[in-house]
Amino acid sequence: MAERRIVAVGGGDVFALWDRVLDLVPPSPRVLWVGTASAESPEYTLMVHDALRDRADVRRVDFFPWPPENLRELVLSQDMIVVGGGNTANMLAIWRVHGFDGLLREAWEQGTVLTGVSAGMICWFEAGVTDSFGPQLAGMPDGLGFLPGSACPHYDGEERRRPVYRKLVDEGFPAGYAADDDAALFFVGTELAEVWTVREGATAYRVEPGNETSLDARLLSGAVSP
């Protein structure tokens, strides 16, 4: 079995972190942008393309008005798949209707590197903290489940993230990981291998009932942000 890798980005300077993710794949890789969570925003798509095009052959997958006929071939031919932020619940519903969730798992198991920010961070876990249902934040228990437990992005970037996540976990929500803006969780298989950051003081945390543990993070150098 190929090495399975996921890089879950909490937010912030995502392009500097994705620059590091590109080091995990061959030179001039094929990269698939998935903007479902932002309703396939053209502005978001263009920003990602402009940021990554010097290092990768960037393509996108759209589900409106319908997905491409060669969806499976497109997904499984990529070296890296990048999932953007937005409405996680809507994104997962669309993926499941079209069988994209299964294709992502197939790609992951064949060695394609999976990454994403915010919605594209929590989707890989069994559960996550999301604003999909309104600004009040809520626990969502039906993620893809590639990674065990739960996740929360923007841990230091949005003031309600920490108290809401801590309360949910204390009340029985699956334990898991939180990531500050400018920090990312690098998983090999289903185990956390390393925490990356592009900002002093930004890190990730293991969150369990009654306890939050700050994780050691490696400060990346030389990453280029657009």
Image (tube, grey):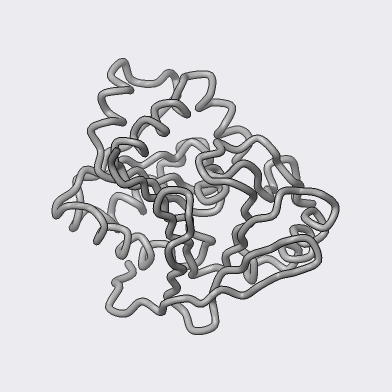
Q: Which residue is most to the top?
A: 69
Q: Residue at x 33, y 22 (%)?
A: 71
Q: Residue at x 77, y 55 (%)?
A: 169
- The quadrant holding residue 22 is bottom left
In the picture, measured across the screen, residue 76 lies left or right of residue 154, that is left
In the picture, measured across the screen, residue 154 lies left or right of residue 32, that is right
Q: Nearer the viewer, residue 225 or 194?
A: 194
Q: Residue at x 73, y 68 (%)?
A: 159
- The quadrant holding residue 16 is bottom left
Residue 201, compared with residue 185, is above or below; it is below
Residue 111 in the image: x percent, y percent?
A: 29, 42
Residue 197 in the image: x percent, y percent?
A: 45, 73
Residue 117, compared with residue 162, is above or below; it is above
Q: How many marks?
A: 0
In the picture, measured across the screen, residue 220 lies left or right of residue 118, that is left
Q: Nearer the viewer, residue 192 or 98?
A: 192
Residue 140, compared with residue 220, is above or below; it is above
In the picture, measured across the screen, residue 31 lies left or right of residue 64, that is left
Q: Residue at x 62, y 62 (%)?
A: 178
Residue 88 in the image: x percent, y percent?
A: 60, 40
Q: Which residue is most to the bottom?
A: 200
**Location of the C terminus (image quadrant):** bottom left
Q: Which residue is most to the right?
A: 171
Q: Nearer the viewer, residue 45 or 196?
A: 196
Q: Nearer the viewer, residue 70 or 103?
A: 103
**Location of the N terminus (image quadrant):** top left
